[in-house]
Image: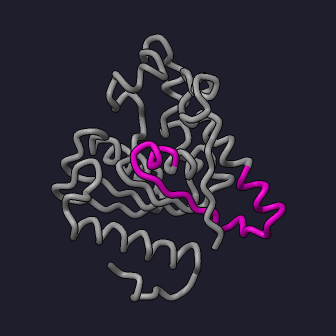
Amino acid sequence: MIQVEIDHRGSGHFGKIGQNYLHRNLGDWELKDYGTVVKWLIANASVDPTRVGITGFCYGGYTTVMALTKAADIFTHGFAGGSVVDWKLYDTEYTERFMDSPSENPEGYKNGSVWPYIQNYKGHLYIAHGTMDDNVHMQNSIQLISALEDAKKDFQFNLYPGGRHGWGNLPAKQAHFDNERAKFIYEYMLQKPFNKEVLR
C-alpha cells in the first residue's frame, strides 16, 4: 500500500495566494489537486485504480465525502469522520470567511455541498460521527445518510454516543474508531485477512 499526503494549493502555508483559490469555492481545487496526484500515481507508480482510498476528519471528512461523490471517477473508498456535507450547516463565522453568505454566493454553496453529486457515488464510504458534536453538528451525517439511502447507495455508518468533535476524551470509543479504520484498510485497500495484532 502506498500512503500519500498531499498539500492542495489552498493549504494554509501557501498564504493568501493559496487561500484565494478557495474563496467562494470550497471543495473544488482540493479535489482537482488530489485527483491530479492520484492520476499521476496510477500512470507512473502502478497504483490500482480500483483501490484509491482517502480518509479524514472534519474538513478532511468533508473532502473524503466530496471525493467519493464529486470525484467518484477517481476515488473509490473513503473513511470519513465528523464531516461537513453542506456549508449552510456549518459555523457561519468560519464559512463566510471563505464563502461569503449563501445569498451572496448561492452557486458556491450548491457546488461546495455533496448534494449535486450523490448519484455519482459508486465506491464504499464509511461515515462516523459523535452524537454530541457541537462543531460539525450530527445533522450533516444524518442528512448525508438519508440522501445515500434515498439514492439506494451502499455505505457504512457508525455513531459514537457522547462523542464530541472527536472522541479522544473517550478512550474506548477512540480505540473502536481506530480499529474500524484499520479493518477498513485491510478489507478494502490491502484486500487481506485482518491482522488482529493491530487492534488497540
The image shows residue 41 at horizontal and vertical percentages of 76, 60
Q: Nearer the viewer, residue 11 or 102?
A: 11
| View extreme (top): residue | 104
Q: Residue at x 34, y 31 (%)?
A: 90
| View extreme (left): residue | 162
Q: Residue at x 39, y 57 (%)?
A: 127
Quarter of the image where one finds residue 172: bottom left
| Vertical arrangement, residue 199 with respect to residue 23, above or below | below
Quarter of the image where one finds residue 126: bottom left
Viewed as shown, does residue 119 lie left or right of 100?
right
The image shows residue 111 at horizontal and vertical percentages of 55, 30
Quarter of the image where one finds residue 178: bottom left
Q: Residue at x 35, y 61 (%)?
A: 157
Give yes or no for residue 49 being in the magenta stretch: yes
Viewed as shown, does residue 134 lie left or right of 38?
left
Q: Nearer the viewer, residue 164 or 184?
A: 164
The image shows residue 77 at horizontal and vertical percentages of 55, 62
Magenta residues span 37-63
| View extreme (right): residue | 44
Q: Residue at x 34, y 47 (%)?
A: 141
